[in-house]
Amino acid sequence: MPHPLSHIRVLDLSRVLAGPWASQTLADLGATVTKIEQPEVGDDTRAWGPPFLKREDGSRTGESGYYLICNRGKRSVTVNLKSPKGQALIRRMAREADVVLENFKVGTLDRLGLGYEDLKRENPRLIYCSVTGFGQTGPRAQQPAYDFMIQAMSGLMSITGESDDRPGGGPMKIGVPMVDLITGLYAATGILAALARREVSGEGEHVDMAMLDVGVTLLANQAMNYMLSDQVPQRRGNRHPNIQPQRVYQCRDGRIILAIGSDSQFVKLCRVLGHPEMAQDERFRSNAGRVTNLSELDPWLDEQLIRHDKAPLLAALEAEGVPSAPINTIADVLQDPQVQHREMRFDVPHPDGMSMPQVRSPMRFRNTSLRLDQGPPTLGQHTDEVLTELGLSPTDIAQLRAEQTI
């Protein structure tokens, strides 16, 4: 089947995670993505290991797991952006591109003649997306940022982790670089919106994507809770601030979670636990009552669940339609029958002839398909191919390589 973005060409000047996550999303959708990397060194994440991909003889290929998770489906071209000839190559590629994606410090590419206004002169229809920590404007615009910083600064860590009055209490970052990942998705969404508008207006666009903006957006209901009540949200561990009961509970042989989202589900939970009368208790009949009287409800639930083994209890809850789940390890997840049925883990070929594992994009279409047959490229794997497409001869390419331009 055709790919949704098979007609789109992306020039990817980004590295690390947020930008590459955006461009991998576009590559999965079928866009031709050319990844520009620094000669000899490449994307920072190539060295962010262990673990590293290994050949059958045990030797490393030079690609870390971090790099491999966000660079599928791209072509790698090495270009020295500090070189005038390298800059000329980028401008030449931008003329043929629909999208340029970059995450350099604000002003860096302007000084190299590769900023939005520079490339707009080369290609007025260009969609140029800049991903930075703090955006193109404001008092922090010049500052660098990493996901951990933004999780702290955005307030996410203040509401993540156990409360200070409990064992292990304190602020905690999320277990994956969530702000980087969601920034990548917002960047891809902004690019797609700009492409859609260009179809109508014929105009290009500069998409300004800031990680701190994204982190604040991710506060979601917690930000609204504060704006409506003037009460600063506190860390509550796994306890939901607005809906109860929702947290981790200890069974006889391990932990599960309950995620009760309605009064009818609470009725079913009480029935499974053998105490239907609790659902009729005036303190607990409504969600508002359960939130208000949680200090009385939670100890009772703890007393009930500790009497059950996980597997039969989860089976009984599932049969009644009560939202609940085991707390899977990553190994458990990849062995889950539903995850395997959806083929979320798959393999792609490596240029060395072996295969390498990947985690699938969650997007699925009925009338089109994703492009998932190309693995992350080795450093500079497609340099000659792409420069030949630009019209350079083998002699030209050899000269640029001798000059350390590529």
Image (cartoon, rainbow, N blue to C red):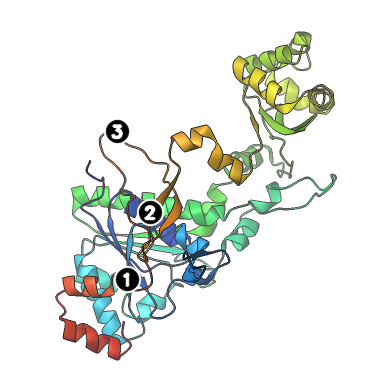
Q: Are marks 2 and 1 in contact (CB under 8 Å)?
A: no
Q: Nearer the viewer, mark 2 or mark 3?
A: 2
Could you tell whether 56 is left or right of 227 in the image? left
Who's the residue at 42% across and 61% down the image? 20
Q: Position of residue 305 (x, y in %)?
A: 78, 24
- Label whose residue precedes the other's in the sequence (2 or 3): 2
- Label whose residue precedes the other's in the sequence (2 or 1): 2
Which amino acid type is shown beneath numbered disc 3? Arg
Could you tell whether 160 is left or right of 88 in the image? right
Circle 1 residue: 381
Q: Which circle marks residue 366 in the picture?
A: 3
Could you tell whether 292 is left or right of 334 in the image? right
Which amino acid type is shown beneath numbered disc 2? Val
Q: Nearer the viewer, mark 2 or mark 1?
A: 2
In the displayed structure, would residue 235 be above or below residue 294? below
Q: Residues within 10 Å of mark 1 (few under 14, many from 20)?
A: some
Q: Position of residue 236 (x, y in %)?
A: 74, 41
Could you tell whether 315 is left or right of 21 in the image? right
Who's the residue at 50% across and 32% down the image? 338
Q: Which circle marks residue 348 in the picture?
A: 2
Q: Position of residue 95 (x, y in %)?
A: 20, 69
Front-lying residue, 266 or 110: 266
Badge 1 marks a residue whose secondary structure is: loop
Badge 3 marks a residue whose secondary structure is: loop
Who's the residue at 64% across and 43% down the image? 329
Front-lying residue, 73 or 182: 73
Q: Is residue 275 visible?
A: yes
